[in-house]
Image: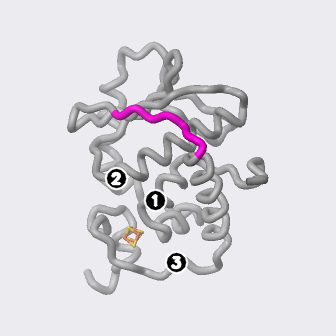
Amino acid sequence: MNLDFEKLKVQGVKVNYYYICKRKLWLFDKGITMEHNSDRVLSGKLIHEKSYQRAKAKEVMIDDILKIDIIQGDYIRETKISSKMPQADKMQIIYYLYYLKNLGITKKGSINYVKEKKVEEVELTEQDEKNIEKTLIEINNITKLKKPPKLEKLPICTKCAYYEFCFAKEI
Ligand code: SF4
């Protein structure tokens, strides 16, 4: 696919939200951020800080757009509280691998699920690259919408920081 990566590249969190909820992606893109109200985010930050206190290399910022938890040797490592959103977590780290490949850097990935104490290894495949390119195009289409995508109740809604925003009438 002939992708204009410079035009379509986004923060990793948007790839993550794309796989969780398109409406969440749109709200976040418009600067409507409510995640600071979420206990889940706070506990995630605390777990993250504790988990990697002794790591040699910590958060790495690339191009002011990509924030990678840890780069260690051949690996980039991400920390997640739990494995409730495995597809979103996997696609986020695949996006990081894809992004780095565009910069001429080849890495593997690993996701550290703190609650379950398990580590998932991720490698970038050709199919992953196609999926990420399609995802970037769709993210661009969604964020260009004048209105948020239609509201659909999802199993994760009650745990989402945007719950009040989306379901104010029901509260
Ligand atoms: S509350 Fe549900 S519909 Fe609204 S943004 Fe969150 S996940 Fe999406």
Does residue 111 appear to the left or right of 124 in the view shown?
A: left
Tag 1, which secondary structure?
A: helix
Q: Is residue 24 above or below residue 122?
A: below
Name which residue type carries label 3. Answer: Pro
Assess whether residue 123 is covered by the magenta stretch: yes
Residue in view at x 59 percent, y 48 percent: 11
Q: Quadrant of the N terminus?
A: bottom right
95 is higher (above) or lower (below) than 22: above
**Is disc 1 surrounded by few (<14), some (14 to 19) or many (20+) residues within 10 Å?**
some
Mark 2 and mark 1 lie on one chain; the one further toward the N terminus is 1
Of badges 3 and 2, nearer the viewer stands: 2
Quadrant of ligand 1 in image:
bottom left
Is the CB of the residue bearing disc 3 within 8 angstroms of ligand 1?
Answer: no
> Which stretch appears magenta?
120-126
Q: CA distance from mark 3 to mark 1?
A: 14 Å
Identify the secondary structure beneath mark 3: loop
What separation in Å lies between label 2 and label 1 (alpha carbons)?
9 Å
The residue under label 2 is: 85
| Disc 1 residue type (three-letter) | Tyr
Q: Which tag, 3 or 2, sits closer to the chain's start?
A: 2
For the residues bearing labels 3 and 1, Cβ distance under 8 angstroms: no
The residue carrying mark 3 is 149
Across and down, in percent, residue 127 comes to 57, 48
| Residue at 35% from the left image edge and 40% from the top image edge | 80
Secondary-structure class at tag 2:
loop
Q: Which residue is mark 1?
A: 19
Disc 2 to disc 1: CB gap under 8 Å = yes
- Percent across and percent down for residue 115 are 22, 38
